[in-house]
Image (cartoon, grey):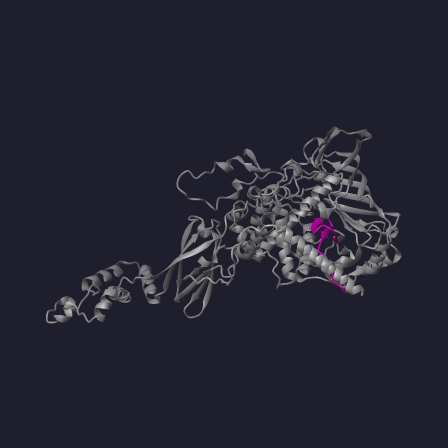
Amino acid sequence: MVALTIFSGTVLPAYASAIKQSKGDFEDKFRQLDADLPTPNVYRNAAGEPGHEYWQQQVDYHIKASLLEDKRRLEATQTVTYTNNSPDTLKYLWLQLDQNYYKADSIASRTRTFSSPSELAKSVDGKPTKISLNTLRKQQFLTDNDVGYEIGTITGNGEQLKATIVGTNMRIDLLKPLKPGRTTEFKLDYAFNITEQKAVGGRAGYEHFPKDKREGGNDIFQLAQWFPRLHAYTDYEAWTNKAFLGSGEFTLEFGDYDVEITVPADHIVAATGELTNASSVLNKMQRKRFEKAKTSKRPVFIVTEAEALENEEKGSSKTKTWHFEAENVRDFAWASSRKFIWDAKGYQQKSSERPLVMAMSFYPKEGGDLWKKYSTESVIHTMEVYSKYSFDYPYPTAQSINGPVGGMEYPMITFNGPRTELQDDGSRTYTLSEKRFLIGVVIHEIGHIYFPMIVNSDERQWTWMDEGLNSFLDSLAKREWETESNWAREPRDIIEYMKSTVQVPVMTQSDSILKIGANAYTKPAVALNILREVVLGRELFDFAFKEYATRWKYKRPTPSDFFRTMEEASGVDLDWFWRGWFYTTDHVDISIDKIYKLRMNTKNPDIDFDRERQMEQDKPMPMSIERNRQEGLKPWVELNKDITDFYEENDEYTVTNKERNKYNKFMKELEPWEREVIQRAVKEDKNYYVLEFSNLGGLVMPILLQLSYEDGTQETINIPAEVWRRSPKSVNKLIVSDKVLKEVEIDPRWETADVDLNNNYFPRRIIPSRIEAYKEKKSKSKVKRDIMQDIKTELKNDEDESTLEIEKAA
């Protein structure tokens, strides 16, 4: 049995740190990653599959919640059924209390930093340190409002259970230990004041519309991380009960949800799962429209804009209860507002498990034609593309909701932006960037329903397994939507980050990542793009990736499961790739430094000596000789031609019979096949080019070459990354050709994120850039306040305005 050590929540074999280069400076970029990955076991095998004893817990929820609109408050009670499928006996359960993140005593609040030391140093010189209005607004809101969970009594089997709150976590002590295979149930009441999302940020909250005609305005409520949720209990980490600091999202347990949501009667509710009481909350016309939407070519309005506008203006003192059920999901979210327009369209797929999925969008009038045209269509497009690379969409609904949250995902439901701009004529327009943002964010968030809401990775621990994989897939879906747009998932889009000093390895835990967008989204997405297009090719990659998705559908994979599956299913050793892109901050910078042109020696002195003579004659004439000739100076031998000897007719390249005999003897002593090889090489007289490369960035990658010849033809050669295996810093490559080489270019299509294109050419090229003329400005001293002049100006402006008002009245 191999001993194990722990590093950043990842189990590593103890021998991983024992491999050390004690002499020399050789670095093995191809050292097998198994030395650093968890040892395969009965839960996760060496192929990257769930092992024959794989397990995960199940947690079922029955929740009754009430939205108190005027108070912007939620009150609820929930009954939780917890099934222990692990081989361990549990004495307590850990729950997430994400709303406590906003409390003043949370770790997130107490460790939030302000400004950099360099910014603060400026204040010493009298220059103010800047603080954003958003920061002030958040501070003021949290000061003025009570936030966080209010937890009521917790009972199990009719008895009160002891609970201990630790920041954003809560431990419930069981009355008796929960043995493997057994189930326990507990009930708790809770409430919290809903935060204003625009003020405090986060993944949920309300947005206020004060300009609506209804007295007091209207709100859109987006409720997520809104109920005490069980932490996952895993085979690799046990309880995943890290404090919630705001960046990473937790992995959760799958289960069945039965949720009743009471809201004002004129509200429309969108939620995870299927609506089970449509006859109680929808009128006859709305139900008829919903049925029509199942087979419609374009989205059908269940609630029209006119109806939503009417709701906006009135309000209601009555309530309705919307009842939703969801099977085998890892979370539950919902949204509610009287402002919602609701459209729907059925998505028909070949799956026998789920042949019909209702794609739906909920948005206020502020969404305008942008949402009407593209939201639901983007939802369906996402399912069509993602299903090709993973599995058919398994749930009955897929929803896009417009509200304060710019982009967030939950099972069957996503929160998305943006909005349209109200013009003076009452119309609503949107920019091209807003259009692309809407389509892009819907694709990305609906894609998250696949990863991690079904393939249940732990973003809190490994953000890239959620965001990176999904960003890679959303780039495929976006390319299939529109090819001309730059969706920022190409290798060229990561260059600045790759060569920056703010990088951390992709495998860094989410709360410690410096640039989460570049690190957890773009870099791993680009890496997978390169793996697909350059390293493996589409056929091998797509097969392996689909295998990973289907293996871990409704299960909880770790990085080692992904790495091993991709290698095992593709049949290609990729340890060098994972190590370079995911475990280091190296970048790609391959330089072609020199090219040597070689010619095969024939061993025949009559041929080789002539070639050597020609090479000498091709050298530039020394300047001193040329200038002597220009001055008319003649050498001694020309002035004394009557004195001659043997060397006037012969030079050092003259062939003698002794050399010819030596050549003939050499050829005679060769084996027939050796003689044939030499004779053929002499006859073909090919060009031998030695290309000298250096790896300046440290990240080993395939060398993609484009060779241009003097006859105008081109040739591409892709040298696998293994060329660096024995010499990771520099290598030479022999190219043999009938043609005369004119130019060599590395990575001509910018496929590898090479950070310096200028050293990718041989011969080197002139670097194109730009220059702009400008007018020099005289330096100004610090501007001083002229209070007297300012007041004079204000008085003059007031006098002018008064005169103007008198003239208007006259």
Q: Nearer the viewer, residue 455 or 769?
A: 769
Residue 406 sits inside the magenta stretch: yes
| Residue 756 position in % (x across, y down) | 48, 56
The answer to whether one can see residue 242 in this image is: no
* Residue 248: quarter of image: top right
State the extent of the magenta-drawn residues as a range. 401-425
Residue at the left extreme? 642
Residue 331, image quadrant: top right
Q: Nearer the viewer, residue 241 or 661?
A: 241
Q: Quadrant of residue 692?
A: bottom left
Quadrant position of the N terminus in the picture: top right
Residue 514's place in the image compared with 283, above or below, is above
Residue 466 visible? The answer is yes
Residue closest to the far top: 176
Q: Nearer the viewer, residue 729 or 405?
A: 405
- Residue 541 position, x and y percent, is 58, 54
Residue at 56% in and 52% down: 527
In the displayed structure, does residue 719 sit left or right of residue 294? left
- Which quadrant would the C terminus be assigned to in this image? bottom right
Report x, y in % for residue 531. Answer: 55, 53
